[in-house]
Structure formats: structure tokens, C-alpha cells
Amino acid sequence: MVHLQKFHERYAADGLFVYTIAMLEERDKVQEITRELAVTFPIFWGVGSELGDRFAFG
């Protein structure tokens, strides 16, 4: 996520849209990680959703 954040910071002004799909069961853990890493791009909740089923890889 650190690399994605740097990518986001560098190219957002050029129109690049960076986002991730969180597939951890614990929402609190996702929020903790994003706070620690100072993530500013969108993170969508994908657990048990069509979004996660169709587009999450990893």
C-alpha cells in the first residue's frame, strides 16, 4: 500500500485514480492499517460483496 500511495500522490493530478478493495474480515484492522500508512486513496470494503467477488485479487 505504501507504493500505491506514492503512485497516487505522484499521478493523481494527471487524472490517475488509485483505489483498493479491502478483503480483511476485520474492518477495524483495515482502518488501523490505513491510518498507520497515511493512505489517502479510496479503500472499498469487499468482503461478502459483489465488488470483492468480481474484482479483488491477491
Image (spheres, rainbow, N blue to C red):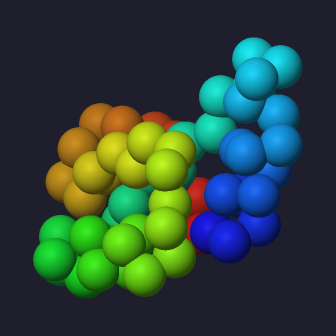
Q: Residue at x 41, y 70 (%)?
A: 34
Percent x, y for residue 37? 51, 76
Percent x, y for residue 15? 75, 17
**Where 19 sits versus 28, above or below?**
above
Please tell me how many numbered marks the rendered image carries. 0
Left or right of 20? Residue 6 is: right
Q: Residue at x 36, y 37 (%)?
A: 51
Q: Which quarter of the image is occupied by the C terminus?
A: bottom right
Percent x, y for residue 22? 38, 61
The reply to whether residue 11 is in sight is yes
The image quadrant that residue 16 belongs to is top right
**Where 17 sits versus 50, above or below?**
above
Q: Residue at x 83, y 19 (%)?
A: 14
Question: Among all residues in the image, which is located at the extreme top?
Answer: 15
Most foreground residue, 49 or 28: 28
Q: Which quarter of the image is occupied by the N terminus?
A: bottom right
Left or right of 16? Residue 23 is: left
Q: Residue at x 68, y 71 (%)?
A: 2
**Where 10 sits versus 27, above or below?**
above
Most foreground residue, 23 or 31: 31
The reply to whether residue 52 is in sight is no
Most foreground residue, 25 or 12: 12
